[in-house]
Image (tube, helix red, strand yellow):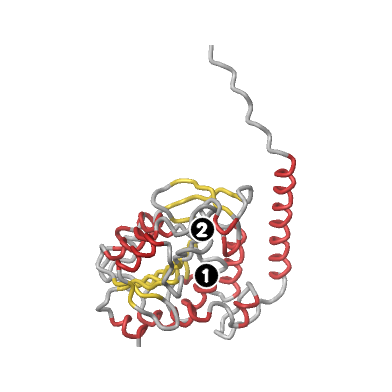
């Protein structure tokens, strides 16, 4: 006769209250989307319509990243956006005639993304995957919402109760055989989970021609309590160096990133980068000259 299992302990009352507050906040976000979607989407300075933040709508959103993406897009046949959020960068790509592939696991972000594609009449120019990308197929917890949602528990002080489940696929499973021989720009903004996504992208990393990657890598920002430097920092860069890429900071004045600097940061805890965005590319590709001119 098997022993009787004790029921799991009930969460304390303060945690229950916190969960209710979080659910109310999520409901408020959903209502805000529906109210916005009842009105025509504003036209951005880039020429496309967009439901999103005011900064996205009036041209103030991530100006440096926007400029770099617009510089690279003319050299590309496809744009892949991992952590697409509401689709701002996908709209930039489609506006320039480059088809887009969007990966976004947060339900409300996907609603915005779909609305933005439909309002611009671009349904045939993008493929949207409402999933996270990781090292293998599965289901994982995702913490938080909006632009700060992360697969990393404790990321940016997000409480553990602000959590949902997300399906996970790998980039190689979904797209590797689809874009053989094409020049791809891959933009990744997934709040600390870059190394896990790259573990499932070996065929893309080894592709010919090599994609241009623009990745947000937080070195000492937003780390969970008790963590000073991104524990996957060195491994994240090694994925690219082992496949023949060079790395640059994606700041106002891009500069080369060498292995010795990354290893020193991991060893000493002193962040010497002036940017949390990085570019990875074939050093001989024509696009590199346009980025670094």
State the image coordinates of residue 215 (x, y, percent, origin top left): 42, 68
The one nearer the camera, 241 or 228, is: 228
What secondary structure is found at the residue carrying circle 2? loop
Query: How many numbered marks does the figure carry?
Result: 2
Q: Closer to the camera, 128 or 70?
A: 70
Residue 16 image-quadrant placement: top right
Distance in Å between CA atoms under marks 1 and 2: 37 Å
Of 178 and 186, nearer the camera is 186
Label 1 sits on residue = 123
User: In front: mark 1 or mark 2?
Assistant: 2
The answer to whether residue 207 is above or below residue 22 is: below
Percent of width and height locating residue 55: 62, 78
Q: Position of residue 132 (x, y in %)?
A: 48, 55
Does residue 193 lie above or below 58 as drawn? above
Q: Is residue 140 above or below residue 230?
A: above
Instruction: Name the residue: 38% across, 73% down.
Output: 279
Q: Which residue is mark 2?
A: 223
In the current view of this chain or complex, which residue is farthest to the top?
A: 1
Q: Is residue 251 visible?
A: yes
User: Is residue 101 in view?
Assistant: no
Is label 1 in a helix, a strand or a loop? helix
Q: Residues within 10 Å of mark 1 (few under 14, many from 20)?
A: few
Residue displayed at 50% across by 61% down: 191
Specify the quadrant of the image occupied by residue 87: bottom right
The residue depicted at 24 percent of the width and 68 percent of the height is 244
- Which quadrant does the C terminus fall into? bottom left
| Sequence-earlier tag: 1 or 2 | 1
Residue 134 lies, in percent from the top left, at 42, 53
Q: Are marks 1 and 2 in contact (CB under 8 Å)?
A: no
- As drawn, the label of residue 268 is none
Spot the residue most to the front.
268
């Amino acid at each position: 006769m098997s022993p009787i299992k004790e029921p799991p302990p009930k969460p304390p009352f303060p945690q229950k209250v916190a969960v209710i507050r979080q659910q109310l906040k999520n409901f408020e976000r959903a209502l805000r989307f529906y109210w916005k979607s009842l009105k025509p989407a504003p036209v951005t300075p880039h020429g496309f319509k967009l439901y999103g933040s005011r900064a996205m709508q009036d041209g103030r959103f991530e100006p440096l990243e926007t400029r770099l993406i617009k510089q690279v897009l003319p050299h590309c046949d496809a744009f892949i956006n991992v952590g697409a959020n509401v689709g701002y960068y996908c709209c930039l790509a489609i506006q320039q005639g480059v088809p887009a592939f969007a990966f976004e696991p947060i339900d409300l972000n996907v609603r915005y993304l779909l609305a933005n594609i439909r309002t611009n009449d671009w349904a045939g120019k993008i493929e949207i995957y409402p999933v996270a990308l990781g090292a293998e197929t599965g289901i994982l917890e995702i913490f938080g919402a909006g632009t700060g949602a992360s697969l990393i528990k404790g990321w940016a002080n997000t409480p553990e109760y602000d959590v949902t489940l997300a399906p996970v696929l790998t980039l190689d499973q979904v797209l590797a055989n689809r874009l053989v021989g094409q020049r791809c720009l891959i933009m990744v903004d997934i709040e600390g989970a870059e190394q896990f996504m790259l573990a499932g992208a070996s065929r893309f990393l080894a592709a010919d021609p090599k994609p241009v990657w623009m990745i947000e890598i937080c070195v000492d920002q937003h780390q969970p309590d008790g963590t000073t430097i991104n524990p996957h920092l060195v491994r994240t860069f090694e994925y690219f160096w082992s496949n023949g890429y060079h790395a640059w900071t994606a700041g106002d004045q891009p500069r080369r990133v060498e292995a010795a600097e990354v290893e020193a940061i991991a060893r000493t805890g002193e962040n010497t980068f002036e940017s949390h965005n990085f570019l990875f590319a074939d050093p001989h590709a024509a696009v590199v000259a346009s980025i670094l001119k």
